[in-house]
Image: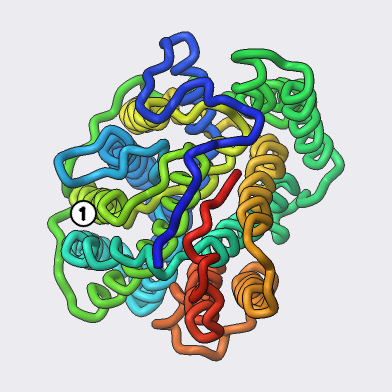
Amino acid sequence: MSLSLNSTVNEDEVPLFAVDQVPPMRRLFPFALQHVLVMYAGAVAVPLVVGRAMHLSIESLTLLISADLVAAGIATMIQAFGLPGIGIRLPIMMGVTFSSVSPMLALIDAAGPAPGAAMAMLPVIYGAVIVSGLFGLLIAPFVGRLTRLFPPTVTGTVILVIGLSLMRIAIDWAGGGQPSDPGYGAPSHLGIAFATLAVILALLKWGRGLARNGAVLAGVIAGAALASLLGQTDFAPVASAGWFAPVHPFQFGMPRFELPISLAMCFVMIVTMIESFGMFLAAGTLVGRPATPDDLARGLRADALGTLIGGVFNTFPYTSFAQNIGLLSMTSVRSRYVCGLGGVILLALGLCPKLAALVAALPISVLGGAGFMMFGMIAATGIRILSTVELTYARLATIAVSVALGLIPVLSDRFFQAMPAALAPLLHSGIVMASTAAVLANLFLGCDRESQEDAPIHI
């Protein structure tokens, strides 16, 4: 059984820039900046959560975020530009995986409240991250051979759930942060979010050329301008930030290797690879270059190498960011060099605190408005793929159970609260739940044993 994807990106749209085409700089930079703005909040979320849990000082937290951006930039360049045998060479952005948070917080909690106890766990965390990166490099070729388990029914379902699971993030962003935050859902936040969305929609309808293809970036700029007029932005940290701050390997100390946390991080690596697998298939479909088993193996090796680099720079495991796949659905820009330059921008942000502070000054509600469009486009792409499949009862059952199980972590934070903590990375990822359910249900119900399994996906 093979996965056959049609090379046409859209029925009525010719790609403005193909995968291996380099756009002129006047277009390349805005497109790349657009990708960075889309994923920036998610890229810095994990170091913020872990750093605050460890009660790091402002200086140490700044170092952690800077190192994270540097490692994300390097990993993104490897994924987009490629090294021999490493990197899928598709427009992919890399960032810290949220799956790694649970085992790290569990280790921090186990350290106890004694002063400095949590800080002493950092070298143990980084040792585990390095081990998981090496483990990922070893198993990447085997995971990359699983394309036979992802016929159109499974692929479309997984992409649909990726989009639906991200909608909760967009909703919280539009509301102003987390439901527990003061002012969450305030009319000013909602107004900024929907104004941003309105600008994006207007440019998609009436814009031409760069204005249309850079609709998200223009919408974010317009939303930020509105937020500034409403007094929702604070640029004081930008003025006080420095222009350059070096990031050194092992800046928080040499790694220590302990078996339990190392095993937990290896499990996280398996989870992130399953997530990346679905995202690679989605990206390949959208740009008209279906991912082969060798492509997938190279992409997974880049994930693993990015994680290894993260451990060396004292950050965390890295994976492909689903947020950015929505941009591929919205524009005709498919060039991997756009994301490659996005990696360069991330690297610059990590080395230049002033630039990082400028991006961080963007109100989260602005990104929420953009997220509604982008994450919805991912879900719509999954629906488009499923529309090419003959929906027999077996396939409908596969889709139904996969979407239902995949949305459990999205709709209920406490559903799996009584399950072992070691299973948290698996049970709290809607993408992993949906992928596993879709593959197993497809095999059990025998959905694709006949000629439909080799039918191409026309999108």
Query: Where is residue 98 drawn, in percent x and y?
Result: 46, 60
Q: Is residue 119 visible?
A: yes
Q: Residue at x 53, y 61 (%)?
A: 152
In this picture, residue 317 sits left or right of residue 431: left
> Dot 1 lies on which element?
helix
Quarter of the N terminus within the rendering: bottom left
Q: Residue at x 14, y 41 (%)?
A: 84
User: Is 408 on the left-hand or right-hand side of 262?
Assistant: right
Camera-side residue of 174 and 353: 174
Q: Is residue 452 left or right of residue 278?
A: right
Display colour scheme: rainbow
Question: In this image, 230 relative to 236: left or right?
Answer: right
* Observer-nearest of 69 and 284: 284
- Disc 1 residue crowd, few under 14, some 14–19, many 20+, Cα 10 Å: many
Q: Residue furthest front?
A: 451
Residue type (three-letter) at the residue carrying disc 1:
Leu
Residue 87 image position (x, y, % from top left): 26, 43
Which quadrant: the C terminus? Answer: top right
Q: Residue at x 53, y 25 (%)?
A: 15
Task: Say which residue label 1 marks.
Answer: 308
Position of residue 441 measured from the top left corner of the image (x, y, whole percent): 54, 81
